[in-house]
Amino acid sequence: MASTIKHRYSEETRFYCFMMLLTFLMGLLPFMFNYVVDPYEMNSVVDAGFDKKKVSEKSHYPLWKVIHYPAKPPEVIVLGDSRARSLRDRYWQGFGYTKAYNFAYGGATVREIYDTFQFIKDNKNLKSLVIGVQLRSFGQNDRDGLNRVPEAIKLSQNPFKYYSNWFVSRVGVELLEKEFGPRISNLVKLGDVSSAHAESGSKKTNVPLGELLDPESCENCMLPENVTSSVHPAFAVAHDTYFGDDLGIWSRLWLPIKIDRELTGKFQKQISRNAKSDWLSFKFSEKSWNYLVEISKWSKQNNVQLVFVIPPTISEMQNRVVEFGYGELNHDFRKRLSGLGDVVDFDFDSSFTRDLTRFTDAYHFNYKASRLIVGEILQLVSNDKKIVAKARKRRMDIICPVLPKDISNKIADDLFEVTEGKSCRIWRARHG
């Protein structure tokens, strides 16, 4: 009898059962690891005692921002790419305004902006939507249609998928390595995970982690030298004619940029090489534009203020747009935007954009400029007199024409008007 019981299961059956149990336990490892380390702070069960934001957010901006979306929805939401992301929550809070949430991502595409808008549009508290945009984001192949937002939403809404996700595990390992050093590499072996799943349009692709880690990785692209510039016929400019000459009353907004200085380092590399990647074969995407049109229609229907912010680049970079034949398109882009919402424009030749000490590279302004820009936008979106007064008191070399006394110049026709302050312009459509 005992012998019969002992051999009820064959050696092969017992082996497979053991392997299934072992596989199950191994499958629990990333789940338990992610639950404890929790790189994106899905729960508050274990206090790791170190800051996760720098590593985790940069690895997957949308996932971090979606999970940290406030339980009490904010009144002001900022969308956009790394330039909009630099308008950080703490700068708003520095003026005493705590009702803003920065939902911008490094390297964000227009589609990601749109999908984030879809995620937050049920917010009943929303009063103002601030979107950072620039012409170059509307290229037809901008970042190959990268869209990380759907994945971020799915992971944030499904804890099981989040805790069992190998990409989340990889970020957890990076966090521990950064905090505790190379000893972790010998203790934790979770495999080589080199990609995170992202959606591109309706197709699913694998996006290298290195690309997600670099907020402006597309700026390092180098197009072949033999690719011919493809300029829209309506905006082609003869080499001996400056585009502004044909703009009538608007021509004074776009005087030729003449700067006699030699750039070095990253500034020179971006002016000579990255600008070529931006503009050599640029074609404006009406599909991307229609995303903004839909956001504008919704904003008007729901009484939400829509403000577009065109962030500054250094004057030499602005000149490259003209050199590649897109000066008039750049002007027309602002006019079209003003038909959707107010446009706060910092990207034109000014004392500010000529001052390299205000920039970290040709595309990105520094934290001091970020604070000033937040202060100007705050005056447009807040009715709190105390907060607005604080913002006005801290003004320096960036002054938007918010009040009549701020206006240094005004240009208008039957459809549009532009008011100028100091290193800032506001474009508006004239209705009736």
Image (spheres, grey):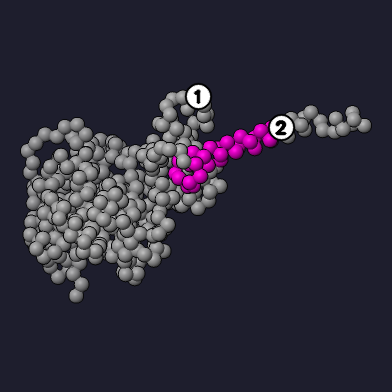
What is the C-alpha distance between the residues marked 2 and 1?
A: 27 Å
Q: Which residues are magenta?
A: 18-46
Left or right of 401? Residue 301 is right
Q: Vertical placement of 336 versus 271: above or below?
A: below
Residue at x 31%, y 65% (from the top left corner)? 127
Q: Which image quadrant is residue 14 in?
A: top right
Badge 1: residue crowd in 10 Å (few <14, some 14–19, many ≥20)? few
- Quadrant placement of the C terminus: bottom left
Q: Is residue 174 visible?
A: no
Point out the tag, 2 or 1, that comes first from the N-terminus: 2
- Quadrant placement of the N terminus: top right
Residue 391 image offset from top left, x and y in percent: 19, 56
Residue 141 image offset from top left, x and y in percent: 34, 47
Circles 2 and 1, Cβ within 8 Å, touching? The answer is no
Left or right of 184? Residue 136 is left
Q: Nearer the viewer, residue 151 or 220?
A: 151
Residue to which mark 2 is pinned: 18
Residue located farthest toward the right when viewing the structure as drawn: 1
Residue to which mark 1 is pinned: 186
Residue 161 image offset from top left, x and y in percent: 54, 46
**What secondary structure is the magenta-colored segment mainly?**
helix
Residue at x 25%, y 51% (from the top left corner)? 94
Q: Give, as a three-letter code, the residue at label 2.
A: Phe
